[in-house]
Image (cartoon, helix red, strand yellow):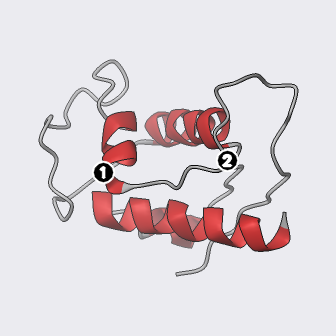
Amino acid sequence: MSASTGATGPDITAGPEITTDSGITTDSVRELLSDRKVFPGLPDDLGEDAELVLDSLGLVWLLHVVEERYGLVVEPTDEDIGGLTSLRRLTGYLRTAQTEEGRTG
């Protein structure tokens, strides 16, 4: 799976919420998806392989929070978005993007 990151590197003026040294994990992505105002239909115990359907607003919000927390700017292609069908795949995509940014950043 290819990741189009459009990485710009961490913004050191953004404040302490950026944690670029922390890796993105399944649990951290599950926690991001736990906001019931944005993702009202997702169960609290979302399984790694359970079907995941993100609407465009939810995806934009999720990527915004990933940028705030991890300093990671991700710009997925339509093909990338089509593959984000489970917690496992979403986490894998974000981890790949984070790893690629580490190599280029």
Q: Number of marks in the image?
A: 2
Q: Position of residue 90 (x, y in %)?
A: 41, 60
- Residue 53, labelled with which disc? 1
Q: Which of 44 and 24 is in front in this view?
A: 24
Residue at the spot of label 2: 20
Q: Could you tell me which quadrant the C terminus lies in?
A: bottom right
Q: Which amino acid does label 2 sit on?
A: Thr
Q: Which residue is drawn at 60% across and 79% down?
A: 2
Residue 32: image quadrant is top left
Q: Which of 12 and 42 is in front in this view?
A: 12
Q: What residue type is labelled 1?
A: Val
When the figure is inspected, residue 57 is found, relative to residue 89, above or below; the finding is above
Going by the picture, which residue comes out furthest to the bottom?
A: 1
Mark 2 / mark 1, whichever is N-terminal: 2
The answer to whether 86 appears left or right of 45 in the picture is: right
Quick one: label 2, few (<14), some, or many (20+) residues within 10 Å?
some
Q: Position of residue 89 (x, y in %)?
A: 36, 67
